Image (cartoon, rainbow, N blue to C red):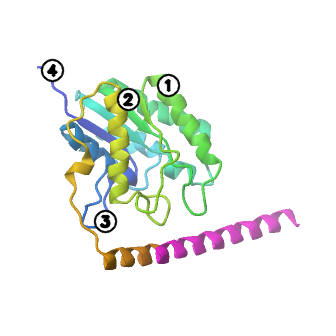
Amino acid sequence: MDCRHGVLALGDSITNGGGELQWGVALQSWALWVARGLALPYTGLALDGASVADVLAEQVPRVPEDTRYDLGCLYVGVNDVRTLEWDRAAFERDHRAALAFLRERCDRVLTLTVPVDLGRPRAGAKVYEVNAAIFASAAAYGALVVDLAGFGARNLVMADHVHPTAFGQVAIAERALDVLAAAGMPVRTQPSVLIRYETTRWGRLRSDLTYSYRHLKVSARAAWVRHRVARSGTARTGT
């Protein structure tokens, strides 16, 4: 009997999901929403803080042997590109290895790029490098790509400019489902149809104030980090 086990998801905290409710909507993984949209079982092995090397070392070995899936999802790179040790060649090598594994075990493989406006301080030009590496490895293994380079909005991304909100996870899932549908995979429903919420004037005001406060904290910390880095550079160069 030819049996498939639905959706397999590897990655970091963005794919792991979890966090604050948004207007009563649970913050669930975009990959889980994709599985629900496809009406397929879900296996999520993503771990908070994971790099692409962690995916290979900790998540791939946890995939049961001799198990096949309808769809394999990989979203990783955010933690890699935000480190001082960023190495495009090493990232692309490991990203290709992860996609190669998924290609062996899944009928379709889906990977995602990284939003350009990433983090505070911003990750900067390194994001273009990580996205180029993701596109290159996807082309090498025939993986579908969800391009999130321009992703980001007040209600879709948290104040840290890294983690999606509950609505952001839904939005990512619907982009992924559009890519899958274009590739011929039957989509049963859109995740936005499955959520229910109501807003109030006071609730919106409170939400805006909370976001503004958190954004101010993140921006202040980013300015402090930039200042320390600048001072450190000045000390090293003697200028």
In 3D space, how far apart are the residues under numbered discs 1 and 2 (Cα atoms)? 15 Å
Look at the image and say whether residue 235 sits in the magenta stretch: yes
Inspect the image, locate mark 3, and give the three-letter code of the amino acid beneath it. Gln
Find out whether the residues at labels 1 and 4 contact each other: C-beta distance under 8 Å: no
Could you say which disc has been placed on residue 151 in the image? Answer: none
- Of 237 and 181, nearer the camera is 181
Residue at which label 4 appears: 2
In 3D space, how far apart are the residues under numbered discs 4 and 2 (Cα atoms)? 19 Å
Crowd band around label 2 with a 10 angstrom C-alpha radius: few (<14), some (14–19), many (20+): some
Nearest to the eye among marks 4 and 3: give it: 3
Crowd band around label 3 with a 10 angstrom C-alpha radius: few (<14), some (14–19), many (20+): some
Task: Pinpoint residue 175: horizontal percent, then vertical percent.
Answer: 38, 41
- Secondary structure at badge 4 equals loop
Q: Does any portion of residue 154 appear in the rendered image?
A: yes
In 3D space, how far apart are the residues under numbered discs 1 and 4 (Cα atoms)? 28 Å
Give the mark, 4 or 2, whose residue is nearer the N terminus: 4
- Secondary structure at badge 3 equals loop
In 3D space, how far apart are the residues under numbered discs 3 and 2 (Cα atoms)? 35 Å
Give the mark, 3 or 2, whose residue is nearer the N terminus: 3
Residue at which label 1 appears: 139
Please, which residue is most extreme toward the right here? Answer: 239
Classify residue 139 as left or right of residue 42: right
Nearest to the eye among marks 1 and 4: give it: 1
Residue at which label 3 appears: 22
Inspect the image, locate mark 2, and give the three-letter code of the amino acid beneath it. Phe
Find out whether the residues at labels 4 and 3 contact each other: C-beta distance under 8 Å: no
Residue at which label 2 appears: 101
Range shown magenta: 212-239
- Where 198 falls versus 61 (above or below)? below
Residue at 49% x, 25% y is: 139
- Secondary structure at badge 1 equals helix
